[in-house]
Image (cartoon, helix red, strand yellow):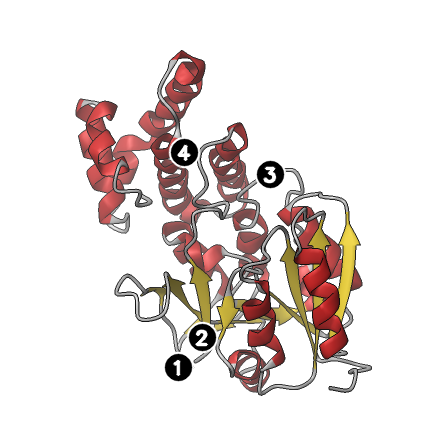
């Protein structure tokens, strides 16, 4: 494939120790029906063969650009991608995920034909070929349309809609809302800001496949940095309270859900007693307002009711490994 001098779309793909899935992720991009794109692979200090694979793939397709750097984390790497992107439009794809063949084409046509600020894809949790657990966690189509504040508020109830992946927007707009470079779960805050800046968000027939694997940030065992999930939620709550008071109920729901999901992974023992106490305090502060919020997800309201008796009663639910 000849290089594209002025690509319409920049696809940014951070890469870190993902040699098992990297080829599949890249091939899902290079096989796109939409030809005018650049794929920016940013090797974020991988210690496996991911960097070598990136170079090999770039030799096979000149639309692939490779950047190697010391490890700085996912958020900072995405920010780096935005600084080097040359396309008018940009989308993020994680290097363990993949997209359908018409992904770029569908997003681009929807965004441009409907004069929208952002186009979004359906998101499917993917466990493996023909796995019965495969399920759509966000479904949309080319008839869906929202104003930005509506989409942003909806995302506070269903976090998959506030991922930086699974969407297409103008690169200049994405550059206005960078991720917090030092935090895990860094994408909800800038994704909310981006959605709020949009006058019009449209759906599409594109599909983003989110690979469910144990080693991802969402599914790895607890580390102290995973408390960032709650910290980022509380940081977002302050912004929403100041700028969009009508969405306070939604962001309180987001804080409570984040708190439960940190508790779900928090190990037992005295070392984590203070962290557990502080998280429970944040949940307790918002408990009744979220319980009476008829837009709150059922799982969150049930967890709030059970924990009112005792947080320990949630342990059997946590063992199933499902988010709340």
Residue 33 visible in the displayed image = yes
Residue occupying the point 61% across, 86% down: 34
Question: Which callout, 4 or 2, points at the residue further toward the start of the chain?
Answer: 2
Query: Which numbered dot is residue 161?
Result: none
- Left or right, 284 with respect to 41, comes to left
Mark 4 or mark 1: which comes first in sequence?
Answer: 1
Numbered disc 3: secondary structure: loop
Chain-order first, disc 1 or disc 2: 1
- Where the N terminus falls, by quadrant? bottom right
| Residue 26 pos. (x, y %) | 61, 70
Within 10 angstroms of label 2, few (less than 14), some, or many (20 or more) residues?
many
Q: CA distance from mark 2 to mark 3?
A: 29 Å
Task: Label 4, secondary structure: give it.
Answer: helix
Q: Earlier in the sequence, mark 3 or mark 1?
A: 1
**Height in image: 274 above or below 156?**
above
Which of discs 4 and 2 lies nearer the camera? The answer is: 4
Q: Quadrant of the rendered structure where residue 112 is?
A: bottom right
Mark 1, secondary structure of its residue: loop
Marks 3 and 1 sit apart, C-alpha to C-alpha, by 35 Å
Eye-nearest disc, 3 or 1: 3
- Tag 3–tag 1 contact (CB < 8 Å): no
* Nearest to the observer: residue 209 or residue 60: 60
Q: Residue at x 35, y 24 (%)?
A: 280
The residue tagged 1 is 143
Residue 183: give its label.
Answer: 3
Location of residue 35 (image quadrant)? bottom right
Q: Which mark is residue 262?
A: 4
Pointer 2 with pointer 3, Cβ within 8 A: no
What SS does tag 2 mark? loop
Where on the picture, by quarter, is residue 145? bottom left
Q: Which residue is mark 2?
A: 203
142 shown above or below 131: below
């Amino acid at each position: 494939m000849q290089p594209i001098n002025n690509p319409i779309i920049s696809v940014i793909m951070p890469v870190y120790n993902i040699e098992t899935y990297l080829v599949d992720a890249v091939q899902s991009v290079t096989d796109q029906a939409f030809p005018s794109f650049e794929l920016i692979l940013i090797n974020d200090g991988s210690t496996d063969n991911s960097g070598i694979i990136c170079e090999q793939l770039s030799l096979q397709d000149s639309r692939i650009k490779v950047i190697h750097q010391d490890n700085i984390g996912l958020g900072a790497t995405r920010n780096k991608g935005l600084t080097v992107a040359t396309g008018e439009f940009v989308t993020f794809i994680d290097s363990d995920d993949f997209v359908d063949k018409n992904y770029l084409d569908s997003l681009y046509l929807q965004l441009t034909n409907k004069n929208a600020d952002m186009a979004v894809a359906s998101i499917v949790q993917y466990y493996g070929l023909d796995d019965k657990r495969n399920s759509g966690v966000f479904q949309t189509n080319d008839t869906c349309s929202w104003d930005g504040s509506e989409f942003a508020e909806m995302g506070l109830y269903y976090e998959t809609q506030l991922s930086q992946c699974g969407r297409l927007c103008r690169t200049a707009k994405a550059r206005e809302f960078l991720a917090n470079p030092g935090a895990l779960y860094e994408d909800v805050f800038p994704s909310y800001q981006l959605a709020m800046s949009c006058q019009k968000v449209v759906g599409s027939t594109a599909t983003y496949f989110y690979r469910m694997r144990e080693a991802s940030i969402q599914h790895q065992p607890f580390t102290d940095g995973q408390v960032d999930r709650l910290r980022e939620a509380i940081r977002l709550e302050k912004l929403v309270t100041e700028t969009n008071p009508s969405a306070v109920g939604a962001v309180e729901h987001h804080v409570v859900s984040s708190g439960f999901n940190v508790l779900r992974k928090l190990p037992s023992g005295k070392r984590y007693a203070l962290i557990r106490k502080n998280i429970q305090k944040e949940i307790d502060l918002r408990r009744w307002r979220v319980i009476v919020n008829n837009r709150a997800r059922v799982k969150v309201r049930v967890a709030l009711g059970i924990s009112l008796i005792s947080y320990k009663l949630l342990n059997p639910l946590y063992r199933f490994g499902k988010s709340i």
